[in-house]
Image (spheres, rainbow, N blue to C red):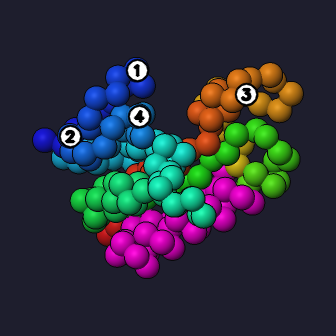
């Protein structure tokens, strides 16, 4: 059974994904009975591969996790959504997250074999904050970090 539901507090393994809940704090995807609205929330900053001092790359586990989910549910259509914190101007944040989502989608299609029919990319900027760290609100760095995330959500089914 692949029913996943995780807790923000616990950092134990998500066995089906072989990743720590530190990287994916919420997953509501039911692999036995997928439905629109089910999602996984991931924080790419936790997947940074810092072994290369010249460039920063995302660890393969990040791409592998997204690819495994999409390929495990070939009849589902997914939205790959990139979100930012509220630093900077709203239009700039939307533009950055659109480019981020688009680049990630292209990588998944070209390097990981994800089919175009299964995925769309959207950048939301700071439009869907998970907390109250909006413009003008004083928040800690950690509180802002919560809003910088990638969400892979089932948005429909392929006929």
Q: Which mark is residue 133?
A: 3
Viewer can see residue 101 = no
Q: In the rendered image, which residue does mark 1 sit on?
A: 9
Q: How far apart are marks 2 and 1 (CA)?
A: 17 Å
Query: What residue range appears in magenta?
Result: 95-124
Residue 78 in percent (x, y) is at 43, 58
Sequence-earlier tag: 3 or 4: 4
Q: Residue 120: say if magenta.
A: yes
Q: Say whether disc 2 or disc 1 marks the residue closer to the N-terminus.
A: 1
Identity of the residue furthest to the bottom in this view: 110
Q: Which of 70/32 is in front? A: 70
Mark-to-mark CA distance, 3 and 1: 20 Å
Q: Main secondary structure of the magenta part?
A: helix
In the rendered image, which residue does mark 2 sit on?
15
- Pair 3/1: label in front: 1
Relative to 45, does residue 72 appear above or below in the rendering?
below
Identify the residue shown where x is 71% and y is 24%. Answer: 140
Q: Residue at x 59, y 33 (%)?
A: 146
**Lower position in the chain sequence, tag 3 or tag 1:** 1
Residue bearing the label numbered 4? 22
| Circle 2: element type | loop
Q: Position of residue 65 (x, y in %)?
A: 34, 54
Judge by depth and name the residue closer to the eye, 86 or 13. 13
């Amino acid at each position: 059974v692949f029913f996943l539901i995780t807790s923000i507090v616990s950092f134990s393994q998500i066995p089906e994904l072989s990743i720590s809940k530190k990287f994916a704090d919420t997953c509501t995807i039911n692999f036995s009975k997928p439905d629109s609205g089910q999602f996984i929330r991931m924080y790419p900053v936790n997947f940074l591969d810092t072994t290369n001092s010249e460039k920063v790359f995302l660890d393969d586990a990040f791409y592998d996790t997204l690819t495994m989910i999409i390929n495990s549910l070939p009849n589902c259509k997914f939205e790959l959504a990139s979100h930012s914190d509220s630093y900077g101007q709203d239009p700039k944040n939307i533009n950055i997250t659109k480019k981020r989502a688009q680049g990630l989608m292209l990588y998944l299609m070209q390097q990981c074999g994800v089919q175009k029919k299964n995925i769309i990319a959207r950048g939301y900027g700071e439009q869907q904050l998970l907390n109250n760290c909006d413009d003008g609100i004083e928040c800690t760095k950690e509180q802002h970090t919560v809003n910088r995330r990638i969400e892979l959500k089932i948005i429909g089914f392929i006929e």
